[in-house]
Each structure stands twice: as structure tokens, then as C-alpha cells.
Image: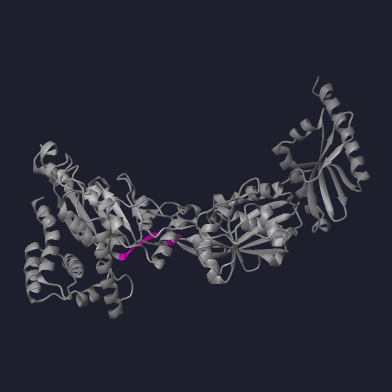
Amino acid sequence: MTGLAAAPKRLAAFRRGLSAETKAAWLLRLQGWRILAHRYAEGPGEVDLIARRGRTIAFVEVKARGDFDRGVEALTPRQQARIRRGAEAFLARRPAYAGYVVTFDLVLVAPGRLPRRLPNAFGW
Amino acid sequence: MVTWVSTVAFEGVEARAVDVQVQVAPGMPAFNVVGLPDKAVTEARERVRAALVASGLALPPRRITVNLAPADLPKEGSHFDLPIALGLMAALGAVPQDALADVTVLGELALDGTIAAVAGCLPAAVAAHARGHALICPEACGAEAAWASADLPIVAPRSLIQIANHLKGVQVLARPRPGLPEAGAAAPDLRDVRGQETAKRALEIAAAGGHNLLFSGSPGSGKSMLASRLPGLLPPLSPRELLEVAMIRSVAGELAGGRLSDRRPFRSPHHSASMAALVGGGARPRPGEIALAHNGVLFLDELPEFSPQALDALRQPLESGEAVIARANHRIAYPARFQLVAAMNPCRCGGGEGGHACRRGPRCAQEYQSRISGPLLDRIDIRLDVPAVTAADLMAPAASEDSTTVAARVAAARRVQATRAEALGIAGSPLNAHVGVGALEEIAQADAAGRRLLRDAADALKLSARGYHRVLRVARTIADLDGAETVGRIHLAEALAYRSAAAAEARAA
């Protein structure tokens, strides 16, 4: 019976994540970025936000935790690989972005603080 | 955009030119090193990234490709860090690009951006000078590199920030000074050896002609003591030899502080040494003990205790004067013209009289001595039995001759050989032990009595062709010490005595 409805705990986490991503998107917009995709998923890859500013395209992972430090720690190598795969899939389908500089950013969301963007945080 | 930086890769003591090409392009962020790098070179990536961050430069989110050309030459060692970092900084505009034209760069980076010492700075400096390049090397190696040439511009920075400031002209670094020659401790003196007059004479002959020498005697008779006196008898290295020795030591990473010494090398590896340790080699070829003994003395104490394989590997270098290490993908030759001095006991129990007398009979000595192969023994010109020292010898007053007196005679004999070789136009080493067979017949003309003796002795002792020539060589050296023009009967007789003692032993065995 529990198989059909998601567990209440996971549902809450999902909602918290969605609201964090909305906050992150607004932070990026305020900094002059244009959001190209939200929750982009393609095969094995998955990216929270994809944004563009000038000749730069940013693949952004959003982390909502109790404080910023735990947000940084929450980014696992496996997740980084997944985001990288997502970015590759995204760029492969859009040759127009071929000459763009690609960065992988992290946006941290924590209660009681303004969201913070860490440019070029991972992806090597 | 591609930036170019020159560096070197080492093949033996040769420094081959290598170009580091750094390309920074837009695209997926990546940092790749290509061009047959080994593990230490691939890891340069992490060190360069950390060092740049520590110097206040973040790596941009670009696709960075580093190519080490020529791409088919295997690159090993950690000295590629600095050229990669400087190429990257030039590509990012942190240092002017034209400042890196005609500069050879080598150095290892620490994570905090300081530049650590690397092996082989002297050959790299020589190669840079030959190409008309300037040199950028670690501060710790500056004193060593400065020896290459007085007019080679050298910059020896301590950190990445220092070199960036130097290249931008903000803070210019001075040229490092050559390291002071090493005075070293005084060599042990021949005067300390009591008795053993025959052995001292043999040592003098070996020093004068560069002959190989084997002392055989019971424990405590002073074989090792005698052998350690040999470097004190040899003349100092000539500037050319000094450079050869320094290049090998630099590649081996043994030239700390850039201090050169004109003392001849004296290497005495332990008898557990493997073949690779003696001759050089391993997965990453390094000069072995015989290369480090180039232009000097290789002393093998307890000769039969060395593994037969390691000893027989010495046969070819003893003849050719170089150690050639061949691998499937490269071939390296280290110069290895050394003088072999060996010491051994007659048998495992010690042999000789008194407390060390052998209780197991002649078989013991036979078995022990047969561990040294005939071909190796054939290459040893002077073989000598060193008798035990008596109490009377020890109580006698110290010998009047010290090392300086003997060294003067040795130097005189070597001068005679050098002028003769020059007159005859002999290329290469002028020492009697090294001249070619053709030239030897010319310089070591025996008189009629000498020829007769030599013919009889060669038949009686069953001398090999090599043995025959080796006797001639030693006789020539004895004549040189005597100041004689031609090789006389007496000289040949003494030379034969040094060979026949061991030959008689070998026959008995």
C-alpha cells in the first residue's frame, strides 16, 4: 500500500529541494544569468539548473542544508559525475553552445541566509 | 591559444630537448597531459593546480591540454612541473609569453608553490647552453647549474611567485654562484700502513697506469686499508673529467649544493649489491656504481661474496669503458671507465696462518676462489697475495714514504704517458691500461732480452691474448715509473710476477 504514495519524509525533502532550486534560480537571475533549463535530465545525467551569461554556460547543482558547510560536503563524486554526464548530453544536443566556456557551479541554500553561489566549484 | 616552453628529458647523462605545449581552449573543463608521461609526470597536474591556487591564480574552467613533444619519447621524472606551470601562466597572461622564448625550464613544484630541487640540473644547463637558451631551475640547484658555463643566464627562483615577478620585471633575481669546490676530509695516508712493501709498490703501479688490482690475503692483513689509500695516490681530476663525473652525479641526484670536487670518486658497494645496482638499470634507468666510479676507483671488498651474475656483468664495461643498458624501448649508455680494485680472502674461513687457518683443507679455498670467473680474473692486471702483518712490522717506526711522495711519482709517470700519447696522436685515455692494442705494441716495445722472457713466460703461464697484452701494459707502467724509454727484461719480469702468483694459484685450484 505504501508503494504508491511516496513516504512523507521523502516528499518533504523533495519539496524543500524544489523551493531551494527556485531560490537559486532567482539568485542567478539577479546576477545576470539566463536560466536555460530547470531539472534537466537526459539518460544517465541530471542537472538542477543550466544558465547562460555572455559566452559562458553554467551547470549548477543546488544544495539545501542546515548550513553552508554541510551543503558543500553533500556533493559526492558520484553526483559530480552525473552532472558532468548531464552537461555533456546537453551540449551534445545544442551545437550552438560549442565555443562557450563551461563551468560547474554550486549554489548553497541554508535557512536564514541568502543563497550563495560558488563558481567553478567542481567538474575537473 | 598555445604557449611553448622548452625543457629536457634525460636519456642517460644526455639531456634531450622537450617542448611543453600548453593549450587553453573553451569547452568542458579538463586538464590533460599527453606525450608518453609516466606516473610522476601525470601527477604534475595536481601539483600544478595546487601551486597555482597557492600563488593566487585559480585555474580557469577551460579545457587545458598539455603536450610534451616529441610525443614518442617517454618522459619521466618530476621536473616537468615548472615548465607546465609557466606555460599555463603564460597562456593565462600571468607572465609575458615572450619572456619564455629561448629559455629551458625545469623544476618540481610543491603544493604551496615553492620549487623543489630536481636531479640532472647540470646536464640540463649544459644542454641549454648548447642550444643558446637561458635556464630556469630550482634555487637549490642553481649552484650546480652555474658550473655549466659562466655566460649562461640562469634564474634560480625559490617559488612560483618569485619567477612570475622576475619574468614580469617586478623583482629581478640575481644569477646564482657556482657552489664552492668541496675541500673534503683529508684522504687516508699511505704512511699508516705498516709493512706490506710489495703491496704498496703494486698500489703505486696500479695508480700510475690505471690498472685493475686484486689483493688476496687472510683477514686483518690490511687489504681494505691499502685499497682505501689508492684515491690519495691518484692525481686530481682534470677539468674535462670533472665535468663528466659531475654530470653522472647530477643525474643520480648526488650533487647536493652544487659542490664539485676534483677528488677522484671512490665507490665501495656492499657485496649484497645486485647487478642493476652495480651496472645501472631498473625500470627507470639510473647510473649504477660503476658509472658513479667513472674516472675513479670501484672497490669491491670480499669479491667472492658478490653474486657471480653481478660480477660477470662487469666484464664488458671493464673492456669498453661504458655501461650500456638496453631496454625494449630505449638504450642508454653511461660512461664507466673505472679502475677495479678488489680484495678477497683465500678461503671462506679466512685462510692463512694462525687463528684464521683453514681446517677444511685445500678444497675450501678451491671452492671459494672458483666463485670468481676466469674471464673476470683475466681482466685484472695485478693480482697480489698480501701476507699477514707480523708484530715486528707493527712495532717498526712508520714508513718514511707518505702518500704525497708516492702521488708525485704517480703524477710524473702519468705525465710521461700523456706526452707519449700526444706525440703518437692517440685519442681517448692516454693511460697504459686504456690505450688500444695497436698503439700498445708501438709504445711498449720490449728489448731483446725482454722479448725472450715474455715468449717463454707466455708459453709457461699459458697467457691468453688479453693476458699477454695486459702484462705488456703493466710492464710499460713499471718502465714509466722507472723513467725508462723502452720496456726492459726487469720490468717485464715484475709485471709477470704480479700475474703469475695468481695464475699458479688458479692452476692449483
Please tell me whether residue B328 belongs to the stretch shown in magenta: yes
Please tell me whether residue B221 belongs to the stretch shown in magenta: no
Relative height, residue A90 to residue B14 (above, below): above
Nearer to me, B496 or B260: B260
Please state if B203 lies on the left or on the right of B31 as rendered: left
- Magenta extent: B320-331
For the N terminus of chain A, the image quarter is top right
Residue drawn at point x = 55 percent, y = 60 percent: B177
Please state if B143 lies on the left or on the right of B357 as rendered: right
Q: How is the image coloured?
A: one colour
Relative height, residue A59 to residue B404 (above, below): above
Please state if B277 lies on the left or on the right of B102 as rendered: left
Q: Furthest residue to the top?
A: A1
Residue drawn at point x = 79 percent, y = 23 percent: A3
Residue B363 is situated, as x and y percent measured from the top left of the image, at 11, 43
Please state if A1 lies on the left or on the right of B355 as rendered: right
Res B136 → quadrant = bottom right
Count the numbered circles shown. 0
Relative height, residue A119 to residue B447 (above, below): above
Instruction: Answer whether residue B73 is visible to the viewer in this image.
Output: no
Nearer to me, B14 or A63: B14
Residue B128 is situated, as x and y percent measured from the top left of the image, at 55, 67
Residue A10 is situated, as x and y percent measured from the top left of the image, at 82, 25
